[in-house]
Amino acid sequence: MCSDSARRHQRCQEGACRRLWPSTSGGPCRRLTSAMRFGVYLPTFAWRDLRFDQAARVKEFARKAEALGFDALWVAEHFLEAPGLYGTVWMSPLLCLAHAASVTTRIRLATGLLIAPYYHPVPLAREIQTLWHLSEGRFVLGVGPGWDQHEFETLGMKLSERGRRTDEIIAALRRLLAERDVSFEGRYYRFQHVTIEPRLPRFPELWVGGGSKIQTSLSPDKPYIVPAVLSRIAGADGWLARAAGSQQMVKDDARVIREHCVKVGRDPGSLRCGHLNFLHLVDTTDREEALRLQRPVFERVMGTHRTFENLQQSYFLGTTREIVERIRDLEAAGVRDMVLATCDYDLGQLERFATDLVGRFTDS
């Protein structure tokens, strides 16, 4: 990073730190020194009534997240309507991150997760390279295989190919972003003599999804991690567990992943484990009242095809104290990155995440 960029990075870090943890002594601000990093989901919902003013909230949300000192902005991907949370399409993840890059200077910008099989590796490599440079190296590549059969059929692919396609794309990207005159001969993707310039100084930090899921008729995922997914995770920099299973499933998955890393000769501590979850903080210490207030918010986003009891298993519902305890429980199980998701473009919730949750995980 050039010296000017480094100075901007340092000033922004210090400013964000002062806003989130103001000094009471007039001295240096208190920094986030917990092992846990906190990011937020950029709510790029493309509601049917999407207007220009709603789309502009992406910019406001990104700026606010950086000002509050969060580590990263994560974005989702789905381009057709699907059940529950995906009952609305989402705006383009890479375009939204490029927009966020133009209005921020420090916060990392992550896809969480880009559905790899929906892309050809060559144009995707160009998009990644462009976003890397536009963000001055802040881009984090998170990929997953996808799960919605209708989306795969729309693109002329079989859902059963999703894992193998994802692995091929990762392999191709690693070469395209590091080498010149790349030729690749895979089962699904083939190309000859491709050079993408300027090459990146390093491959982006790579996160992959996958993990146990509470079984429903709407998803092909299983209540355990299949071997191919374990191998993919072990080859990445980080693993992002989505809120598709219970709290215990996430902890069990983290243990299984650590054991697999040991088995294949990788230091488990070199792999960061992350978890993404939705929450809506409310002003009550009574659990039943908290659930009453949260229920309509969650049902608007998640739909009603799952029972509210099922939603309580997967998502962070309940009092703020209970949510803090769930995060601490995951931290004890090895989760080091927490991605907090609002249920809408709610800047008030974002502020509460910073003060009521993140502040409890910083060292005194």
Image: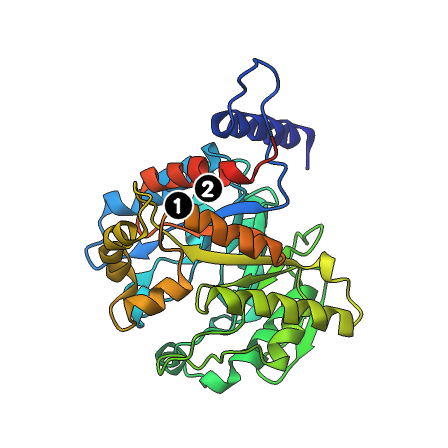
Image quarter where the N terminus lies is top right
Name the amino acid type tagged 1: Thr
Q: Furthest-top residue in view?
A: 26
- Mark number displayed over residue 357: 2
- Mark number displayed over residue 113: none
> Does label 2 or label 1 sit earlier along the sequence?
1
Q: Tell me the SS state at disc 1.
A: helix
Q: Check disc 1: other Cα within 10 Å, few if <14, some if 14-19, many if 20+.
A: many
Q: Furthest-left residue in view?
A: 49
Q: Nearer the viewer, residue 308 or 11?
A: 308
Q: How is the image coloured?
A: rainbow
- Mark number displayed over residue 320: 1
Give the side of residue 125 with respect to residue 259, left or right: left
Q: Nearer the viewer, residue 160 or 267?
A: 267
Q: Tell me the SS state at disc 2.
A: helix
Q: Evaluate if marks 2 and 1 touch, with contact meaning CB atoms under 8 Å apart.
A: yes
State whether residue 103 appears in this view. Answer: no
Residue found at x 32% / y 56%:
45
Name the amino acid type tagged 2: Leu
Residue found at x 35% / y 69%:
310
Image quarter where the C terminus lies is top right
Q: Position of residue 29 (x, y in %)?
A: 58, 23
Instruction: State whether residue 150 is above or below residue 130.
Output: below
Q: Quadrant of residue 220?
A: bottom left
Q: Position of residue 144 (x, y in %)?
A: 52, 69
Q: Position of residue 236 (x, y in %)?
A: 66, 64
